[in-house]
Image (cartoon, rainbow, N blue to C red):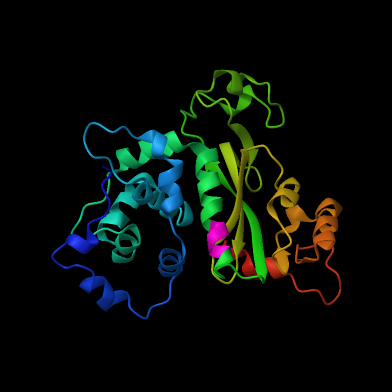
Amino acid sequence: MPKTGSANGSFWGNFLYDQLLAGREHLLLDLKRLVDFGFVRRACRDFYQDWGRDAWDPVVLFKLVCLQFLYDLSDREMEEQATFNLLYQWFLGLAAEERPPDHTTRCRFRARLGAEGFQTLFNHMVAQARERGLVSAGLHILDATHLQAKVDRFRLKREHCRVEDDDTWANRHSPDPDARFGRKGKGKTFYGYKAHIVEDAKTELIVAVKTTPGNAADGRQLPELVDGRAGEVTADQAYDRQANHAPLAGLGVASGVSRRRPRPGRPRLSRRWRPKI
């Protein structure tokens, strides 16, 4: 039988959480109140056997991975926050004095779930949040962030390959052959992936995500990430392409993409909202 959090069975019960969190506003409070996470158990039932020690409830582990993704935390940082952050403990369903699953348990769950599995479950959570009015129909922000591959980068010396070439010495010899060299800023490179993210400006909830190799162009990802349910989409100048403006217009979504040649009277919304994402 999977181990769930024991908040209701602890000495404190929910008294401590009620005293500290009642009447407060926060994304995690809304997510736990509005989203039924039972779909996670159904999706992960093949991960578990009917014998052996009790395993952690996949809902607890999925929520941990979501928190780590939403707040960009390392494995160790996530374990620390889940131990001492009362809001995180309440969201996970843990008692205030209860220890969360350790980082190795979470890492094994994340590896078994895989990137596509996590994306599917995360999108299901977002769909429920949208149905219950948690995601606004206003401004959505699009941007990309780089993700370093967990490899020995000293072996992947930059002179051995070209960023634009997929068939390279580095990719043939890397323990993570799906990763690629990409650029971030002027003269800086990284080896790994890009996470292309759409965030609801009002609630700061990530509503769409796509992961690509590090050499994928940011601007080419917009059509797959944006639907017609936002009133406006803003992004930086890397997304200023007719191939992006046209689909937005076809969806009836206002384009707040920062122009390389700004139109008179049009504010550069991406500069205003970029720090949020």
Taking the view exactly as shown, the residue that stands out farthest to the bottom is 23
Residue 157 in which image quadrant: top right
| Residue 224 appears in the figure | yes
- The span picked out in magenta is 126-130
Q: Residue at x 68, y 32 (%)?
A: 163
Task: Return the x and y of residue 160 as percentages of the image width and height.
Answer: 62, 22
In the displayed structure image, the side of residue 50 where residue 67 appears, left or right: right
Q: In the picture, which quadrant includes the N terminus?
A: top left
Look at the image and say whether residue 124 sits in the magenta stretch.
no
Q: Residue at x 69, y 39 (%)?
A: 216
Q: Position of 227 compared to 38: left or right? A: right
User: Would residue 96 be visible to someone looking at this image?
Assistant: no
Find residue 128 and report its horizontal and vertical position in percent.
54, 60
Q: Nearer the viewer, residue 129 or 155?
A: 129
Front residue (pair 230, 239): 230
Residue at 43% of width from left, 48% of height from top?
40
**Residue 221: where, in percent of width, then height?**
71, 47
User: Vertically, is 191 above or below 142?
Assistant: above
Quadrant location, the C terminus: bottom right
Q: Residue at x 26, y 60 (%)?
A: 84
Q: Of helix, strand and loop, which mostly describes the magenta segment?
A: helix
Compared to residue 58, the image places residue 89 above or below, namely below
